Amino acid sequence: MSKKGLGKGLQALLPSINDGSAETDRIIEIPLADIRVNKKQPRKVFDDEKLNELALSIKEHGVVQPIIVRKSDDGTFEIVAGERRLRACRKIGAKNIPAIIKDLDEMQISEIALIENIQRENLNPIEEASAYKVLIEQFGLTQEELSKRIGKSRPFITNTLRLLTLPQTVKDLVSYGKLSSGHARALLSIQKESEQDDLAKNIIKYGLSVRQTEKKVKDLVQVEKKTKTSPRLEDPVLKEIEQRLKNKFSTKVEIKDKNKKGLIEIEYYGEGELQRIIELLLGELEL
C-alpha cells in the first residue's frame, strides 16, 4: 500500500532494530502489566478469530515488530501503535513485549494510531469516520489538512464522515461487517431514519448487492420527492448552479425556489467541515 502523503506519520516512529541513535529509539522489553490501552485508539472492534491466529503466531515466532508506547507520569506506558500485538501477547500469557518508547503529544498519538490502522486496513468504515472526526474537531484540522496527513482524498474523507449521520442501528451493522461501506453510502440518500433502518435490514435479509440497493434507494427517493411539500427545482439554470455548488463544496447542496424566492441549503458534518465551507464562502466574497 502506498504511503504517499503520510509525512512523518508512522514511518518516523519505526526505526530499524540497529538504530540506536537516541535512547527512546531503542527496543526494550516492557512488562505487559505496565501498559494501558490508548483511549484514542480508533479501532473498537477486534476479530477474535484473527486475534487467536496472531496469538498462535507470536507464541511460535515471537513479536516480530515492536509496539510503540508513550511513558506516562505515573511510570506506566500508554500504547500508541500495536494494540493487537499487545492483546495477542496477553492471550498467550506473555509477561513482556518488545517496545519503542516515544515522546508524543495527544495529536500525534491520535494521528499515528489512525495511520497504523489505515495502512493495515484494520478499521471498519465507522471507526475510520470516527477517527477523522476526532482529528478534525479536537485538533482543529481541516479536511484538506487531514487529507495531506493521511494520504486520502478530501472527497473520500467527506463521504466517510457522512456515514456518522446514519442511525446507530445501521452504523452497528457496518461496524460488524454486516453492511459494506458501499451499502451504507447508498442509504445516505434516504431522508427518513426509519426507512434507512428498514432497508438496511432488507439488504441483509435478501443479500442485496450494492447496485440493487442503489436501485431501491432511487425508488424510495422518488417517492420522498413526490410527498415533499417544498417545490421541485425545475429551472435548468438553477439546476446547473446547484450541481456546481455541490462540486465546489463537496457536500449536499439544495436550492429551493418558488416564484423567484427561496433558500440555498448547504449540509455539513462536523465543526471542521463547517469551518471549511465558511472559509470557501468568505474566500469567494473577498474576490
Image (tube, grey):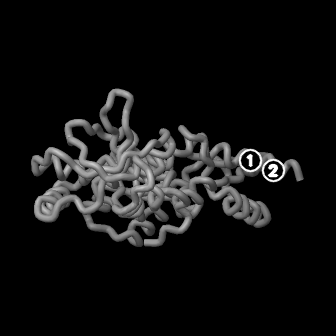
Could you say whether the residue bearing mark 2 is in a helix, strand or loop? helix
View extreme (right): residue: 287
User: Hey, which quadrant is residue 56 in on the image?
Assistant: bottom left
Dividing the picture into quadrants, the one containing residue 167 is: top left
Q: Residues within 10 Å of mark 2 (few under 14, many from 20)?
A: few
Compared across the picture, whether 120 is left or right of 270 comes to: left
Q: Nearer the viewer, residue 211 or 21?
A: 21
Q: Measured from the top left, where is residue 3 in percent x and y? A: 49, 67
Residue at x 87% of width, y 49% of height: 286
Q: Are marks 2 and 1 in contact (CB under 8 Å)?
A: yes
Question: Looking at the picture, which amino acid does disc 2 mark?
Answer: Gly
Considering depth in this image, is 188 or 25 the residue closer to the camera?
A: 25
Q: Who is closer to the viewer here, 74 or 82?
A: 74
* Residue occupied by mark 2: 283
Residue 183 visible, this orientation: no
Give the image location of residue 39, x and y in percent: 36, 38
Q: Quadrant of the N terminus?
A: bottom left
Residue that numbered label 1 is attached to: 279
Viewer can see residue 120: yes
Instruction: Residue 153: give x, y in percent of width and height.
Output: 57, 64
